Image: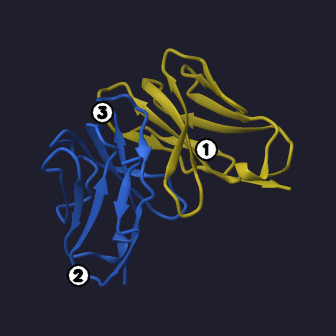
Amino acid sequence: GAGVSQTPSNKVTEKGKYVELRCDPISGHTALYWYRQSLGQGPEFLIYFQGTGAADDSGLPNDRFFAVRPEGSVSTLKIQRTERGDSAVYLCASSPGRRTGELFFGEGSRLTVL
Amino acid sequence: KQEVTQIPAALSVPEGENLVLNCSFTDSAIYNLQWFRQDPGKGLTSLLLIQSSQREQTSGRLNASLDKSSGRSTLYIAASQPGDSATYLCAVLLGTGANNLFFGTGTRLTVIP
């Protein structure tokens, strides 16, 4: 596609529920990142994929968070047993290659946990 | 851990003014620095990318400088326009091999017509 696409754009869920957020990167981009942005803050790194593998998942806050990219394109961020503190905008970004540094961001998925 | 600070947190200027946004970082061993723009409720748009070996980059009315040794970068916007109103974020990529960007908290710019 023309840009990074994220769905849903908004998700409201109840505490304890399971949530999946999807990211469709720019075609041909091998690097994919997930970031989380809380109100008034800059984005914080969650996980980085190079191809199909999670090359760096050091930013995932705990084991309730998991992400996959099975075919090296679309990625899904999965959050189990959601908590109110998980409420944030989840941003996905892609990049043409390893460590080019120039990231192209989607518009984010706003998650609200009631 | 890399700390990135942006001052001021918010800035209002009349249309037509030139302005400077500041970014400082604690670890000077960076690979590159990137400036982004974020409109309310939107994702981030890359404005300028400066490699660690470079001193500045220019794109239209925007000029970004990098002084790695002092841990500082500035984004200069010339002849500001109301359409420039947005939050501006700087982010650094470390030279350690880590793949994640460290972001500042941003400067919210309002250009008054």
Chain letter, yellow:
B
Amino acid type at mark 2? Gly
**Which comes before the other along the chain, label 1 or label 3?**
1
- Which residue is identified by label 2? A16
- Which residue is identified by label 3? B98
What is the x, y in percent for residue A13? 32, 81
C-alpha distance separating marks 3 and 2 = 33 Å
C-alpha distance separating marks 1 and 3 = 22 Å
The picture's colour for chain A is blue
C-alpha distance separating marks 2 and 1 = 36 Å
- Which residue is identified by label 1? B6
Q: Which residue occupies 27% across, 58% down? A: A61
Which chain contains the residue that carries disc 2?
Answer: A
Same chain for mark 2 and mark 1? The answer is no
From the image, state whether disc 2 or disc 1 is nearer to you: 2
Q: Left or right: A61 with respect to B37?
A: left
Same chain for mark 1 and mark 3? The answer is yes
Amino acid type at mark 3? Ala
Let me know if residue A23 appears in the view.
yes
Q: Which residue occupies 31% across, 35% down? A: B99
